[in-house]
Image (cartoon, rainbow, N blue to C red):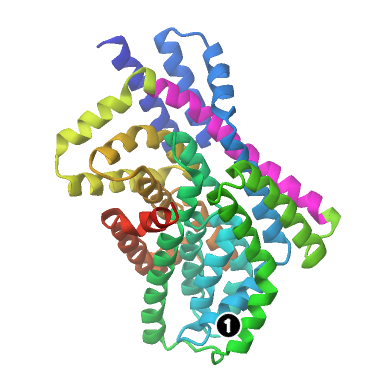
Amino acid sequence: MSGDTFAILVLLGSFFLMVLLRFPIAYAVALSSVFCLLAQGLPLSTVCQQMVKGISSFSLMAVPFFITMGCLMGKGGISEKLIALADSCVGWMRGGMAMVNIVASYFFGGISGSAGADTASLGSILIPMMVDQGYDDDFSTAVTITSSCEGLLVPPSHNMVIYATTAGGISVGSLFLAGYVPGALLALSLMVGSYIISVRRNYPRGSKFSVRNLLKQLSMSFWALAAILIVVFGVVGGVFTATESAAIAVIYSLIVSVFIYKGLDWKGVWRVVGDCVDTLSIVMILIATSSIFGYCLTRLHVPDMAVSMIVGVTDNPIALALLLNLILFVLGCIMDMAPIILIATPILLPIATAIGLHPIQFGIMVVLNCGIGLLTPPVGSVLFIGSAIGKVPMERLVKATLPFYVCMIITLMAITFIPAISMWLPTVLG
């Protein structure tokens, strides 16, 4: 056995062993990389060098700003206004509250960029409200957790910033634009599934549609929705970089939350900043440790070997696209989102481009696959959050979510095999 082969076995074997033993993913990534470096006889100072290099990126500075913006808007009294706006749009349908849940997640996702934040913020309001109106608790929770994945696709999503940085040379603005149509398609798919279930279970309708009420709620939600315009159109129009737009959006979110919606006082702002630091520390540690892991993979030529191995299975582009989705889905079942993006992108992106997938289209595929992974055992963090908020046992929740898995997979297949879904808006807007 050659030295490189032994180092690869040490790297991947120790990593998956620690994942199965439920080590925190950052520890698993870091320790397996250290073992690999020791097996190759390299100095451990490489660990520090690669960690610093991994987080020393101007583009990555956007991540803490987007996280802070989401926390401020999420705790600043915006959730109720977005729910009221969604209700004025779709509440009149059969199973109206399920439709409101899905549409509100689309609105709120464009502000928080986090499926977990969406589930925690909207779920704590909508799940009890749906149960009081006659909806089953497992159905209400399943709608909440699956619709929360819209926030991963709708900009501003800090996971897209991580993907753009990892992929190299990808426009953050184009990725932001590419997420709107897939996010809307996912919402539409979930709404169709919810409508079918609502008709079968005879769930209630909401109030009749009113243009006056819609305009009223739209005016009340304008200040929150304007944050998205600042970020997306500022980046796409070339007015700001992604990092600059994120920083401006934080200041804007602070003003809106404290002075306009008055959902936060200054003590509340400090609490939100503390929550942001907790979240950011986890994300940045993952990015730093994944940089060491990526260095080891690249040094041992694992991406090249993986490409040769996967392409060796079949040369059919359709089969390879399905295989890429399967790999990402399996990874999503055992790992969190950021590590998958950081580790799998350098390995799988060359295969994706070789079969004709645009890097931006592949980025949307990666994000949605990771979103589905957030809802699947054993490491589905959003699944756990939904179970806790809805007070629904995990077994019942997974069973209730099965029809929505089908909706999400149909959306994923459409994104995979119809490039225009992801590429139309970035192409039209240049």
Q: Which residue is drawn at 48% across and 18% down?
A: 34
User: What is the number of callouts on the image?
Assistant: 1
Q: In this view, does 284 lie to the left or right of 299?
A: right
Residue under numbered circle 1: 88
Circle 1: element type:
helix
Q: Is residue 22 visible?
A: no
**Residue 63 is one of the magenta-drawn residues:** no
Residues in magenta?
A: 268-297
Q: Is residue 29 left or right of residue 233?
A: left
Q: Is residue 217 above or below residue 121?
A: below
Q: Residue 334: where, in percent of width, then height?
A: 41, 43
Find the residue positioned furthest to the bottom: 208
Dot 1: within a 10 Å radius of its alpha carbon, few (fewer than 14), some, or many (20 or more) residues?
Answer: many
Q: Name the foreground residue: 234 vs 77.
A: 234
Q: Residue 307: where, in percent of width, then height?
A: 25, 31
Q: Name the foreground residue: 19 vs 324.
A: 324
Q: Residue 232: where, in percent of width, then height?
A: 56, 54
**Residue 286 is one of the magenta-drawn residues:** yes
Find the residue positioned furthest to the right: 266
Quarter of the figure with the N terminus: top left
Q: Main secondary structure of the magenta part?
A: helix
- Could you say which quadrant of the image residue 105 lies in? bottom right
Q: Residue at x 62, y 41 (%)?
A: 243
Q: Residue 340: where, in percent of width, then height?
A: 43, 40
Q: Is residue 13 left or right of residue 37?
A: left
